[in-house]
Amino acid sequence: AQTVTQSQPEMSVQEAETVTLSCTYDTSESDYYLFWYKQPPSRQMILVIRQEAYKQQNATENRFSVNFQKAAKSFSLKISDSQLGDAAMYFCAYRRSGGYQKVTFGTGTKLQVIP
Amino acid sequence: NAGVMQNPRHLVRRRGQEARLRCSPMKGHSHVYWYRQLPEEGLKFMVYLQKENIIDESGMPKERFSAEFPKEGPSILRIQQVVRGDSAAYFCATATGMSDEQFFGPGTRLTVL
């Protein structure tokens, strides 16, 4: 069974600084997707970034980038130039490729942005 | 193009009552996933349905919970005889096909008094 582990229940960052959220996962599959979702107080699940396992290049979306280490099964999220609106819960998630696609989520990291 | 709709957004029930949660997929989406988020936890898969069929209900509690996705109308997650432990946020996600990207709804927060 696939598992996703986020070992940082809470993190804080100064506004305009950079922060990295950690995630490790376990799977026997070779082809899969990894995601970071943001959940603000509204509780809406917002897709931040997505990585396809067969792609070696790390995904980037504006101020958000990932460090994908397939051999180590590590998938960290870097937020640059942190803004107050980045404060939220962040969930790392996994979905295998092919077949139907239930998503496995980590337990989340609560990010606080300090003005 | 409207996104995934869930209603109600907030639902309060007393112990023993029934809760019905609705999920209206995006246009063209015929695949629905339900997830539950207990307080202070991540989302956990409950059930996957295609139109009129339950494909995988391995994450559903064995009793009191049921789901359907009729040919017409929204998908329904039904919880009978609710207990306090059912208090959670329930999310649905929909997709066009089995292997396609899931889009999440805003969730329904169920509170059992």
Image (spheres, coloured by chain):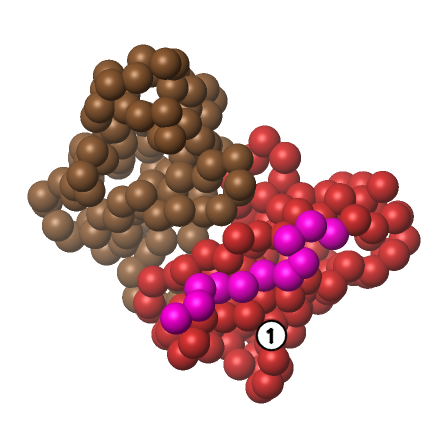
Chain colours: A brown, B red
Q: Residue at x 53, y 35 (%)?
A: A41
Q: Residue at x 60, y 74 (%)?
A: B74
Residue A19, horizontal then vertical, whole percent: 27, 20
Q: Residue at x 36, y 30 (%)?
A: A86
Residue B99, horizontal then vertical, whole percent: 33, 68
Residue B25, horizontal then vertical, whole percent: 50, 70
| Left or right: residue A52 compared with residue B92 | left
Residue A8 in view in this figure: no
The answer to if A61 sits in the magenta stretch is no
The quadrant in which residue B112 appears is top right
Q: Which residue is mark 1?
A: B74
Q: Chain of mark 1?
A: B
| Left or right: residue A66 compared with residue A56 | right
The answer to if B8 sits in the magenta stretch is yes
Q: What kind of element bears circle 1?
A: loop
The amino acid at mark 1 is Pro
Q: Residue at x 39, y 71 (%)?
A: B1
The quadrant in which residue A36 appears is top left
Residue A107, horizontal then vertical, whole percent: 49, 34
Q: Nearer the viewer, residue B102 or B106?
A: B106
- For the record, the magenta segment spans B1-11
Residue A34 in view in this figure: yes
Q: Nearer the viewer, residue B21 or A14?
A: A14
The quadrant in which residue A6 appears is top left
